[in-house]
Amino acid sequence: MLNHFAHGYALLIGIGTTAESRWSLPVTVKDVQALKTVLIDPNLCAYLDDSEHIRLLQNEQTTRSAILDGLTWLEEKAAADKDATIVVFYSGHGCFDLSSQCYYLLQHDFNSTDIANTALSAQEFTQALRQIQAKRLWVVIDSCHAEGMATAKGELPADFIATALPKGVIDALKQGEGRAVFTSSRGNQRSYIRRDGTMSLYTYHLIEALRGAANQPGDSKVMLSNLINHLGKTVPESAKTQRQAEQTPFFDTAMEDFPIAMLRGGKGLPNLTPVSDLPKIMTDQEVVTPALARAKRALAFLEEQAASFGIRIPVDLQIELEEKRRQVIELESRHQRTGLD
């Protein structure tokens, strides 16, 4: 008999068409539709398929007010269910204002000539997320899609650059216990679309992980660690083979591992030994070693990019470099303290 992930609630946002058609990105709708299909499948993630547990916003529905209303809905769900696991997934464009140092999500009704006053700012988005008092909150931002930017008949206004979620915004989003933030790429990278056009590279591999691609025999739930391990390996490989480009997912999470969904409807993968229903705790070796390796690879890539600019390195790239260098230093120090050398 199949179980349900009854305490799971998800807001899935696929911007798709925008009021200014040149910024539309249809693949984002494919992303959220495919993700919803996997989440509500009773033989896979087993979220309850009703309006009380899943809310899908796409195309004209993805207005600034509708997104904020969706976050309020999640706040109410978390308040009513002390065991809630909250998922927020956004697939669409994002940009950074160099002059004000603000990040914006470009929802359906934004105005490209007045982004600061019409787009959904990271500050508003973060404030709304902080109101969600859930034990487990997982935020996924799949932004800065290369294909959409390339086909746009025009560029962003001066001082605005298309980019993934900056580290500073991620730090603000993950304030509090039991919170994890995933982004599809690093700040100055693009997030690519599969060659067959079915969905983004990142979402494709995310769905693989939700189906159990990184699980082990005996597992009955898909954990954050399963997603991190799978995405960290497969997304860069696919970007390199399909697009001859760099795309490195970023993960920022508390030390505690927690379940995101059922595995194969709760049946899990067969094992002769009993499996506890409690979330397993990732060891320091499981967390620090791969994190340090990823950080060093990302730093090397950023330094290579910076070298190509000579002495006129863009401000956003300088910020990325300093943040990544600090991260490498912190991880190396922790690596030594835990005796993992």
Image (spheres, rainbow, N blue to C red):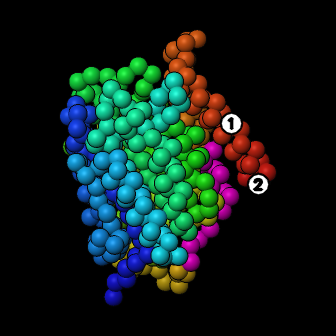
For marks 2 and 1, give the one nearer the viewer.
Answer: 1
- Of the 4 image quadrants, the one containing the N terminus is bottom left
77 or 87: nearer the viewer: 77
Q: Secondary structure at mark 2?
A: loop
Looking at the rendering, which quadrant does residue 258 occupy?
A: bottom right
Residue 205 location, x and y as percent? Answer: 36, 53
Q: Residue furthest bottom?
A: 1
The reply to whether the C-beta atoms of the residues labelled 2 and 1 are less than 8 Å apart is: no
Q: Is residue 30 above or below residue 99?
A: below
Three-letter code for the amino acid on which mark 1 is drawn: Arg
Magenta stretch: residue 291 in it?
Answer: yes
Residue 260 in sight from this viewpoint: no
Magenta stretch: residue 174 in it?
Answer: no
Residue 87 in sight from this viewpoint: yes
Three-letter code for the amino acid on which mark 2 is drawn: Thr
Q: Residue furthest top?
A: 311
Residue at mark 2 to residue at mark 1: CA–CA distance: 18 Å
Residue 89 location, x and y as percent? Answer: 39, 54
For marks 2 and 1 on the same chain, the one whose residue lies earlier in the sequence: 1
Rendered residue at 30%/47% (across/down): 63
Residue 297 location, x and y as percent? Answer: 56, 36
Rendered residue at 58%/63% (across/down): 178
Image side of residue 153 versus residue 93, left or right = left
55 or 272: nearer the viewer: 55
Q: Which residues are magenta?
A: 278-292
Looking at the rendering, which quadrant does residue 206 occupy?
A: bottom left
Rendered residue at 44%/70% (across/down): 77
Image side of residue 296 versus residue 93, left or right = right
Q: Which residue is mark 1?
A: 326
Q: Which residue is mark 2?
A: 338
Residue 2 location, x and y as percent? Answer: 34, 83
Q: Residues within 10 Å of mark 2 (few under 14, many from 20)?
A: few
